Amino acid sequence: MKLPALAVALLSGVASSSTLLDFTPGEPTWYARNDTVMGGVSSSQVRVGGGVLLFTGQVRLENNGGFSGIRSNPGRFDLSGFSSLKLRVKGDGKRYALQLGTSTRNGVTYRNEFGTVAGQWIEVTIPLNSLRATRSGERVAGPPLDPSRVIFFGLTIGNNRAERFALEVDWIKGQ
């Protein structure tokens, strides 16, 4: 069984610039987490295939909704050897947010937004120290992200607009 690059780095005790997720078999599975948890009606789908993650759907504003998101199943991702994450993405010109979570119980995630260029692959760098504590998309007081305690990755869109969206992710690397 092939271990993801991150698992190999963690098992060897060495974390260097490496591919964390390249959406191949053996990596965490992903699931949708939309505003339906609060009564909204937005929808999204996530599909992993051919080494690419595809996140698509529609954000709707009815019932105080307004976001769609996906998360990886919980695991252990010690990112303490990295100062930033780099993503290779192809989007639709909309803004998305990368989220990292250190708990599945308190609702707090650490996030920062990034832009996309419609129909073009681009690389986006997000410094880990730029991720801010949020709950339900709103900033909250809290300690800074502890990169050694990350248990899931997430992507979300919530631009206060009813809109269809599509984002592809080729890989996520630690730097």
Image: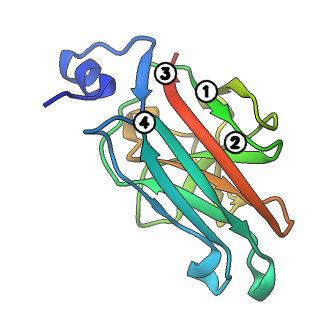
Q: Could you tell me how far apart the alpha carbons at marks 2 and 1 are, in whole angstroms?
A: 16 Å
Q: Residue 104, percent across and down?
A: 41, 62
Report the residue at 79% width, 85% height from top: 62
Report the residue at 83% width, 70% height from top: 162
- Residue type at mark 1: give it: Arg
Q: Is residue 28 left or right of residue 38?
A: left
Q: From where the camera sits, is residue 117 visible?
A: yes
Q: Residue 173, percent across and down?
A: 49, 23
Report the residue at 23% width, 16% height from top: 13
Residue 11 sits above or below residue 17 on the image: below
- Residue type at mark 2: give it: Asn
Of labels 2 and 4, earlier in sequence is 4
* Circle 4: element type: loop
Question: Can you identify the residue that label 4 sits on?
Answer: 50
* Circle 2: element type: strand
Q: Is residue 84 left or right of residue 91?
A: left
How did the renderer colour the structure?
rainbow
Res 164 → quadrant: bottom right
- Residue type at mark 4: give it: Gly
Question: Can you identify the residue that label 2 sits on?
Answer: 112
Q: Please identify, in this view, whether the residue under mark 2 or under mark 4 is nearer the observer.
A: 4
Of labels 3 and 1, earlier in sequence is 1
Q: From where the camera sits, is residue 142 visible?
A: no
Of labels 1 and 4, earlier in sequence is 4
Q: Residue 86, percent across and down?
A: 59, 24
Question: Can you identify the residue that label 3 sits on?
Answer: 174
Q: Nearer the viewer, residue 59 or 16?
A: 59
Q: Are marks 2 and 3 in contact (CB under 8 Å)?
A: no
